[in-house]
Image (cartoon, rainbow, N blue to C red):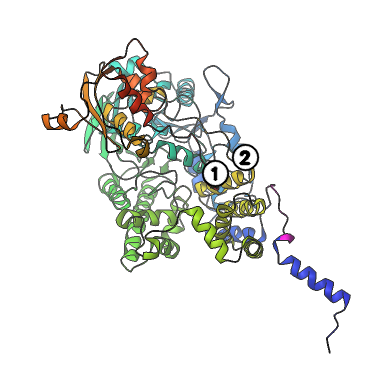
């Protein structure tokens, strides 16, 4: 006899079944509030960290003199380059439920802006750009350390100190390392003529110019696109989106430039700069390929550059760059401790100073231990057979290191830093043959979704796990579904909601920005590309060989596979000559003329072009073609005109933007 089911029971059953399926979820493009799981995760940090400790706030406010009340505008007044007060207004009060409280605290500290007196001889302007600019009182004028990203913010800082402390000329500029936020604003403190003539001395580590212009060139298109995610450049700052970078508030969007060093530092050395003794500490291969710290005996102060800051830094930045050496990083800090552990104050190119010798030694010691721990424990586990993903999930910081706010992962993270160390030693492959030759992402996604039983089943299970707060795996699975079915609106909306919850929980600002940017693009599509950071002033300093290297990267192997071209290139204003050949889909060059045998192998060797360096920049960066340049009066070409056309037709123009969260 068949058992009868009552109508109320049947309705209840249908409701329960319906609640377990994707259809019960509210799918839309709107931003969501923090889930209970996110609230609980963020709340736990209050018991793990000492939020009652306000010493960092005391240090960040110490010596305050004045602030900038209004937005910093472009020279023509049409564009806001930086708006300092926006960040202090955003981060007022207690942490909202949609922001990790530790990251909120860091953002509050970074938003403290203005001119500060570090000691009798040293001042800083903080919170008006991503980095700090420091001013040291010399015998005749100001010695400027790291003049920010943009001309406009750097000029505003100089005006602030001249107004509120003392009006003095700038006599020297020190670039601590080769990242844009530490040199791009140089024209705001000194004009090009004075810099080029040597009237304003420029001190930088060896290789500074090459490293400064090269890091973002060879892989520049991809790195610029990923930087949009790392800094969430296209999003509005709010408590459900980006609230800073952890390293500072944001990058100024203004005029960028560079100046060549008058004196290069290639080892530890003592120099006198505008009457001020400075002991430079050479620290290459750590936070930047070339970098230096500096000790000021007169005021017993140590400048930590970007080697020592109030965050765990990146061993490999998420925007993309070569892996850094965390072991060398820790050794640089140890070396500074041994020589200058008596310092009364430590000031750096980001964040706020550390005052008092005991605090300086303690901070430097735990920073040293932080980078050594990341290195040693990663290598320990990879030697036990763990893969990068496995060890990233297994390594936990020693509690004595982790309890210090200055060691928290606001900019770098323990997870991606350990994987960077793994990559440095063992590369991308984890040793499992299944990972040796995987299918491309879209193809793999389609097969995976089919194996799982189809999109409807996957979406139902994803909704179930989302409601359980299992966001990491939901993101992994839904990413497969979106790549298999990019037209699946519900999959994209739920994945966006998942990224959003992960953003709310992230202590790391760049992780939060990646998640927030990913959620935005899933909901709204890819926006307009960000403006390029490679300004004409910076590109003009690119050496010829770097330009030719970049030109070679642009060669499309299929378009060039049957081409054989030889050109003698004369860069007239540099008095440089290179012999270029495109053969076997490879563009090579040499400053030496080809041998008789090489000339016999070439299809032709009579093509000659005379060009200026600025025009070569246009050519290499894709702003002009050979054909366009050849029409100009100041470009001379002798030989087969088709050689130029053939070479031009072999070159790709890289897109300014491309998809990341969708195929």
Is 30 in the magenta? yes
Is 321 in the magenta? no
Residue that protrudes farthest toward the right in the picture: 7
Mark 1, secondary structure of its residue: helix
Q: Which residue occupies the foreground of this view, 459 or 519?
A: 459
Residue 550 percent location from the top left of the image? 33, 33
Mark 2, secondary structure of its residue: helix
Q: Is residue 363 above or below residue 657?
A: below
- From this viewpoint, is residue 121 visible? no
Q: Kindly indicate the quadrant of the structure image that contains residue 158.
A: top left
Q: Which label number is shown at residue 90?
A: 2
Q: Is residue 39 above or below residue 219?
A: below
Q: Kindly indicate the quadrant of the structure image that contains residue 193.
A: top left
Q: Is residue 113 above or below residue 377?
A: above
Q: Which residue occupies the foreground of this view, 608 or 103?
A: 608
Can you identify the residue that label 1 sits on? 107
Q: Which residue occupies the foreground of this view, 34 or 96?
A: 34
Badge 2 crowding class, 10 Å Cα cut-off, few under 14, some 14 to 19, many 20 or more, is: some
Magenta-colored span: 23-32
Residue that protrudes farthest toward the top in the picture: 633
Q: Are circles 1 and 2 on residues that touch, CB within 8 Å? A: yes
Q: Is residue 15 above or below residue 649?
A: below
Residue that protrudes farthest toward the bottom in the picture: 1
């Amino acid at each position: 006899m068949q058992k009868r089911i009552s109508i109320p029971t049947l309705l209840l059953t249908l409701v329960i079944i319906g609640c377990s399926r994707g259809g019960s979820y509210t799918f839309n493009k709107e931003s969501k509030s923090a889930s209970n799981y996110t609230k609980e995760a963020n709340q736990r940090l209050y018991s793990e960290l000492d939020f009652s400790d306000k010493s960092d706030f005391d240090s960040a406010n110490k010596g305050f003199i004045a602030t900038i009340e209004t937005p910093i505008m472009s020279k023509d007044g049409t564009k806001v380059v930086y708006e300092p007060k926006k960040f202090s207004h955003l981060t007022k009060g207690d942490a909202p439920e949609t922001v990790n409280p530790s990251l909120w605290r860091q953002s509050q500290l970074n938003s403290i802006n203005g001119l500060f007196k570090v000691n009798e001889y040293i001042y800083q302007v903080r919170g008006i750009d991503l980095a700090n600019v420091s001013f040291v009182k010399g015998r005749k004028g100001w010695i400027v350390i790291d003049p920010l990203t943009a001309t406009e913010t750097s000029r505003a800082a100089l005006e602030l100190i001249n107004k509120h402390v003392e009006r003095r000329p700038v006599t020297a500029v020190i670039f601590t390392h080769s990242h844009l936020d530490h040199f791009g604003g140089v024209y705001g403190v000194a004009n090009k003529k004075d810099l080029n003539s040597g009237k304003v001395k420029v001190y930088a580590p060896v290789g500074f110019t090459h490293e400064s212009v090269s890091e973002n060139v060879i892989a520049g298109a991809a790195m610029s696109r990923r930087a949009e995610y790392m800094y969430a450049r296209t999003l509005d700052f709010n408590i459900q989106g980006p609230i800073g970078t952890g390293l500072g508030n944001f990058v100024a969007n203004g005029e960028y430039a560079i100046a060549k060093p008058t004196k290069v530092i290639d080892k530890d050395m003592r120099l006198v700069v505008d009457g001020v003794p400075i002991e430079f500490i050479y620290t290459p291969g750590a936070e930047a390929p070339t970098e230096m710290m500096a000790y000021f005996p007169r005021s017993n102060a140590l400048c930590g550059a970007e080697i020592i800051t109030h965050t765990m830094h990146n061993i490999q930045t998420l925007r993309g760059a070569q892996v850094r050496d965390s072991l060398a990083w820790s050794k640089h800090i140890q070396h500074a401790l041994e020589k200058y552990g008596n310092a009364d104050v430590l000031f750096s190119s980001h964040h706020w100073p550390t005052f008092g010798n005991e605090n300086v030694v303690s901070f430097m010691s735990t920073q040293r231990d932080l980078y050594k721990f990341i290195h040693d424990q990663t290598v320990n586990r990879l030697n036990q057979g763990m893969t990068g993903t496995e060890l990233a999930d297994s390594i936990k910081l020693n509690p004595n290191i982790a309890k210090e706010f200055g060691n928290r992962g606001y900019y770098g993270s323990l997870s991606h830093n350990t994987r960077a160390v793994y990559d440095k030693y063992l590369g991308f492959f984890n040793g499992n043959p299944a990972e040796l030759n995987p299918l491309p992402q879209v193809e793999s996604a389609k097969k995976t979704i089919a194996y799982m039983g189809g999109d409807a089943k996957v979406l139902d299970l994803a909704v179930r796990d989302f409601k359980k707060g299992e966001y990491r795996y939901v993101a992994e699975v839904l990413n497969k579904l979106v790549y298999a079915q990019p037209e699946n609106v519900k999959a994209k909306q739920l994945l966006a909601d998942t990224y959003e919850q992960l953003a709310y929980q992230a202590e790391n600002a760049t992780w939060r920005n990646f998640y927030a940017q990913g959620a935005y693009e899933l909901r709204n599509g890819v926006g307009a590309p960000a403006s390029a950071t490679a300004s004409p002033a910076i590109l003009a300093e690119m050496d010829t060989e770097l330009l030719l290297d970049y030109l070679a990267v642009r060669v499309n192997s299929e378009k060039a596979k049957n081409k054989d071209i030889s050109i003698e290139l004369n860069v007239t204003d540099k008095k440089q000559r290179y012999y270029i050949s495109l053969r076997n889909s490879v563009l090579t060059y040499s400053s030496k003329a080809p041998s008789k045998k090489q000339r016999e192998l070439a299809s032709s060797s009579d093509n000659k072009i005379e060009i200026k360096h600025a025009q070569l920049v246009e050519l290499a960066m894709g702003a002009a073609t050979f054909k366009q340049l050849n029409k100009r009066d100041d470009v001379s070409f002798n030989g087969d005109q088709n050689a130029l056309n053939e070479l031009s037709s072999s070159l790709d123009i890289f897109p300014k933007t491309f998809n990341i969260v969708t195929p």
